[in-house]
């Protein structure tokens, strides 16, 4: 691999592949987008238009047949294909990045991790929300102890989409792992675990509220962490009035911030990483304080750190070249899946689940 860009094969060119992975791979020094796999002719044309010189393939099997021409495979296809495709890539001798959720169950995720370890190959999960502006800002506040001892963490990933869009992400078929618990829940649970550590108890409510919807579209999780922090996590497509993205309450102060990180919107608009990437305007900064409401101007503004999705693939490139740890491991993702599986049982049975 020395002296040349690492060649990347990307499986899937829907939302995840075309909006997130391909642009971030192309923007990463030391990586080169070599091949895009999609069976749809219009997406093949789109890939060629957006990434001149890229090769296209109609099936992942074409990649396994020329594994010696690649240095990394990225799986950005529908959820139900993640485990079989990642397994095939690892067996072909290829390092792998898998979009979240890496699998439908924690056992499957740990099985993939064991296979990668047995083969001596990198396996990482794309949890890009660890590099959101608000998350990086909050993490800095916690590391500096500016909130005191955190007691409660509220995290919301809410939208107002009163009509279902359809597609596999909203499918009720069990094999698709559709619904917001696995989609947006993968993000908010991962963030809670990174910030506050292992979970000992899970309670959840999962509802299907929209006419014609098949999978959960309004879900709440209450997590008790071994550290004593309680996390309340909300993921919803039916929220007519959006709440704060984060509200974090500590023994000395609280931190509140509204709105989503700007990077996804920028990528959807066709913008690419460069100077000023991930920066939030001052109007979007969160506020820190005690005894006052940020809605009425209470507290002090906290300058937002820039969001940095490109850091994920930069870390992957370093791991492949230098042997440094991957930015997110499959075993970390399995820990989050333990929580998601417990949440599904809790919502189904109406009970809290101990881990």
Image: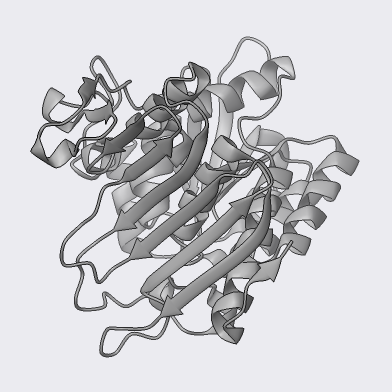
Residue in the picture at 39% in, 39% down: 248
Residue lying farthest front? 291
Q: Residue 157 location in percent, x, y?
A: 34, 54
Is any atom of residue 72 visible in this view?
yes
Image-based side of 339 in relation to 233, left or right? right
For the rendered model, the colour scheme is: one colour
Residue shown at 68% from the left, 12% from the top: 2
User: What is the tally of numbered marks visible in this picture?
Assistant: 0
Quarter assignment of residue 67? top right
In x, y percent, where is residue 112?
77, 53
Residue 70 appears in the rendering:
no
Viewer-closest of 119 and 266: 266
Residue 154 shown left or right of residue 78 in the figure? left
Q: Residue at x 24, y 36 (%)?
A: 262
Quadrant occupied by the N terminus: top right
Name the image quarter holding the C terminus.
Answer: bottom right
Q: Is residue 238 left or right of residue 37?
A: left
Q: Nearer the viewer, residue 165 or 133?
A: 133
State the image coordinates of residue 281 (x, y, percent, origin top left): 15, 25
Residue at the far top in the pictured view = 3
Residue positioned most to the right: 118
Q: Position of residue 55 (x, y in %)?
A: 46, 42
Of 141 and 31, which appears nearest the observer? Answer: 141
Determine the residue positioned at 16% across, 62% down: 241
Residue 133, relative to residue 201: is it above or below?
Answer: above
Residue at the bottom extreme?
Answer: 212
């Amino acid at each position: 691999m020395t002296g040349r860009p690492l060649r990347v094969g990307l499986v899937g060119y829907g939302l995840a592949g075309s909006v997130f992975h391909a642009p971030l791979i192309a923007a990463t020094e030391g990586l080169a987008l070599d091949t895009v796999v999609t069976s749809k002719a219009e997406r093949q044309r789109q890939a060629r238009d957006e990434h001149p010189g890229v090769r296209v393939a109609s099936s992942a099997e074409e990649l396994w047949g020329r594994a010696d021409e690649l240095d990394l495979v990225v799986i950005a296809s529908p959820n139900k294909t993640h485990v079989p495709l990642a397994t095939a890539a690892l067996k072909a001798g290829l390092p792998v990045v898998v979009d979240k959720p890496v699998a439908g169950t924690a056992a499957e995720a740990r099985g993939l991790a064991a296979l990668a370890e047995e083969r001596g190959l990198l396996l990482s999960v794309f949890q890009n929300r660890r590099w959101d502006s608000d998350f990086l800002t909050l993490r800095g506040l916690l590391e500096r102890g500016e909130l005191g001892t955190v007691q409660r963490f509220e995290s919301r990933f809410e939208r107002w989409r009163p009509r279902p869009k359809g597609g596999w992400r909203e499918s009720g078929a069990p094999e698709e792992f559709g619904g917001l618990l696995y989609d947006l829940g993968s993000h908010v649970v991962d963030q809670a675990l990174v910030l506050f550590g292992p979970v000992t108890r899970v309670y959840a409510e999962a509802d299907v509220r929209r006419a014609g919807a098949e999978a959960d579209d309004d879900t709440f999780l209450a997590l008790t962490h071994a550290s004593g922090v309680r996390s309340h996590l909300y993921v919803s497509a039916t929220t007519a009035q959006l709440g704060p993205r984060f509200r974090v309450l500590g023994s000395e102060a609280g931190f509140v911030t509204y709105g989503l990180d700007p990077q996804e919107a920028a990528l959807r608009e066709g913008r690419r990483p460069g100077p000023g990437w991930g920066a939030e305007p001052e109007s979007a900064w969160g506020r820190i304080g005690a005894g006052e409401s940020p809605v009425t101007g209470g507290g002090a503004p906290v300058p937002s750190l820039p969001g940095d999705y490109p850091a994920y693939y930069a870390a992957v490139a370093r791991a492949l070249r230098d042997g440094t740890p991957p930015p997110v491991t499959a075993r970390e993702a399995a820990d989050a899946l333990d929580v998601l599986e417990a949440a599904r049982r809790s919502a189904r049975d109406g009970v809290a689940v101990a881990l």
